[in-house]
Amino acid sequence: MMMIQLAFRKMQFALPVMAALAIASVPTSFVHAQAVVASVNDDPITNVDIEQHTRILRAMNRPATREAALESIYETRLKLMEMSKYKISPSENDIGWALGFTSRALKLDPQAVLNNLQRSGVTNDQWRQKFRAEAGWMQLIRALNRTIEPSEAEVEEELARTGKSKSTEYVLRQVIFVVPNNASAGAVESRAAEANQLRARFTDCATGIPLATALRDVAVREPVTRYASALSEPLRKVLDSTQAGRLTAPSRSAQGIEMLAVCSKGEKQDQNAADNVRGDLLFKKLQKESERRYREVRAKAIIVTKR
């Protein structure tokens, strides 16, 4: 669980995205009938399951053949079965961690991964099941390998090798031009124009925040401090390209038109660096155990396919 917590801390800034995904709306039914085409340990797999996992793989820029989709289903189902044996039930935060971790591996923002899944027509049930399996499986592997820990010497060596002991520190404030869910395209465009007008006048947080709070239906969040090491690569690029005291470009969200005020930024001693490196090293060690155990589970599985 420690590894899960350490890795999840890296994705905390993506939590607003997770709140949005909780109410994400995607198709949940299909017009064509389902037909059983395979089974794994007597758990039936339908043509719709294959279609959905094909879409998941395509959304993640992975090979999306029928065989790859079947293997993805086998892996998800077998991991869920093993989790059930040990009564492991991941929370919503754990599912969020799994999505965030996958997003980092793909070098994408979690919201971008969600958008890809939605555009590909993946249902909520299917992608949640996939990430639930990944989160729970890692909890299981951690529980079965509690004695595995990176040594302090390994952590210090990795910090020295990567130079991760320092990182850019950002002080940020979220500025939201609230837009109703049922707003017309014209209304959204009008609010975006208002956001850009504020952006042009916003030169520092001391004077800019009062300007924002004086506007109609504009919410300004409390300041948060984040290190670059805890942010996704796309977000880091946006913040790095934004001058201190300025606003990032407006973007559409579930709440409206959002911008980030970069109140300050600069290189600081990263207080989370050692924990982040320790979490990364631990994950690499556990990943080897994960692969070994899954090979064993996969080899014992009873798989039947219909041609």
Image (cartoon, rainbow, N blue to C red):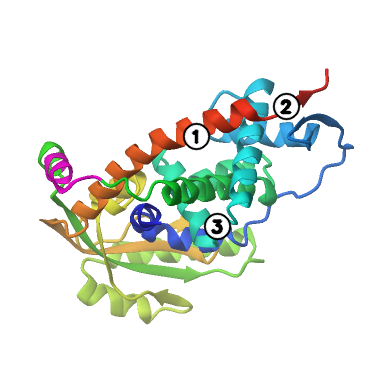
Answer yes or no: is residue 29 visible.
yes
At label 1, counting other C-alpha atoms closer than 10 Å, the crowd grade (few under 14, some 14-19, many 20 or more) is: few
Give residue 216's position: percent from left, percent from top: 46, 79
Residue drawn at point x = 19 percent, y = 46 percent: 151
Q: Is 152 colored magenta in this rendering?
A: yes
Between discs 3 and 2, the one toward the N terminus:
3
Q: Earlier in the sequence, mark 3 or mark 1?
A: 3
Tally of numbered discs: 3
Residue flagged by tag 1: what amino acid is it?
Arg
In-front residue for pair 94/11: 94
> Where is residue 129 shown, x and y percent of the image?
63, 48
Q: Nearer the viewer, mark 3 or mark 2?
A: 2
Tag of residue 74 = none
The answer to whether the residue labelled 3 contacts the one labelled 1, judged by CB atoms less than 8 Å apart, is: no
Give whichever of 175, 23 is nearer the camera.
23
Name the residue carrying label 2. Answer: 303
- Circle 3 SS class: loop
Asked whether residue 253 is in view, the answer is no
Q: Which residue is mark 3?
A: 90
Q: Is 288 on the left or on the right of 228, as rendered?
A: right
Q: Amino acid at mark 2?
A: Ile
Indicate left or right for 197 with 292 as reference: left
**Quadrant in which the N terminus appears:** bottom left
The quadrant of the rendering that contains the C terminus is top right
Height in image: 20 above or below 218?
Answer: above
The disc at residue 293 is 1
What is the three-letter code of the residue carrying label 3? Pro
Where residue 118 appears, as percent x and y from the top left, is 63, 45
Q: Residue at x 69, y 22 (%)?
A: 66
Which type of secondary structure does the marked residue at label 1 adopt? helix
Q: Which residues are magenta?
A: 150-158
Using the image as rendered, state which of residue 142 and residue 225 is in the foreground.
Answer: 142
